[in-house]
Image (tube, rainbow, N blue to C red):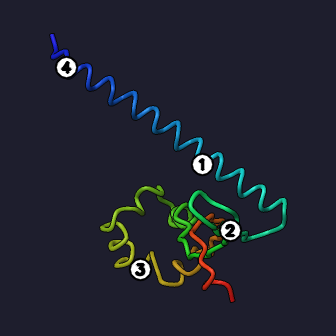
Amino acid sequence: MGDANLEELYTEFEELKAESKEKQLRAKEIKDEIMNQMEEDGVDEVIIEGLDGLVELSITYPEREVLNKKALAQALDMKQKELSKPQVIIQLTNEGRLTEEMIEQFTEIEERKQFSAKEYTESEEE
């Protein structure tokens, strides 16, 4: 049927992919544990001993503007996935159905919790 060598390589490929996904999932779980511990301790940043020196762990809450496409689609009485098509946006704008005011109305500020870990150097301390 098939090439035994290809089958063997493919099997190893799938096993490594599965292992990689498991490791990524575990890393995310550990990151969440670190963030939870920092929150319990009431700190947004902390300096700890890392593998090769000091590491600064920090939690930030950056804000960004996001268009609420679901609410906008409902207001326009259409499916949300239609709003992902540039030609639909152009058509709605040309017809006057989609206005700058509507875009502003359905734009929301989204705050995301973000974790970072970076090498700490003494010069960063002020």
Name the residue at 56% across, 76% down: 65
**Can you say whether 26 is above or below 100 in the image?**
above
Q: What element carries label 3?
A: loop
Q: Which amino acid does label 4 sit on?
A: Asn
41 horizontally vs 103: left or right? right
**Can you say whether 80 is above or below 57 in the image?**
above
Q: Which amino acid does label 2 sit on?
A: Ile
The picture places residue 94, in percent across and down from the top left corner, at 34, 79
Quarter holding residue 51: bottom right
Mark positioned earlier in the residue sequence (3 or 1): 1
Q: What element carries label 1?
A: helix
Name the residue at 60% across, 65% down: 53
Nearer the observer: mark 2 or 3; the answer is 2
Give the crowd class for mark 1: few <14, some 14-19, many >=20 residues within 10 Å. few
Q: Do the residues labelled 1 and 4 touch (CB within 8 Å)?
A: no
Query: Gap between marks 1 and 2, in whole Å?
Result: 15 Å
| Label disc, if present, on residue 28 of the rendered structure | 1
Quadrant of the snapshot with the N terminus? top left
Residue identified by numbered label 2: 59
Residue identified by numbered label 4: 5
Residue identified by numbered label 3: 96
Q: Are marks 3 and 4 in contact (CB under 8 Å)?
A: no
Name the residue at 19% across, 15% down: 4
**Can you say whether 83 is above or below 14 in the image?**
below
Q: Are marks 3 and 1 in contact (CB under 8 Å)?
A: no
Mark positioned earlier in the residue sequence (1 or 4): 4
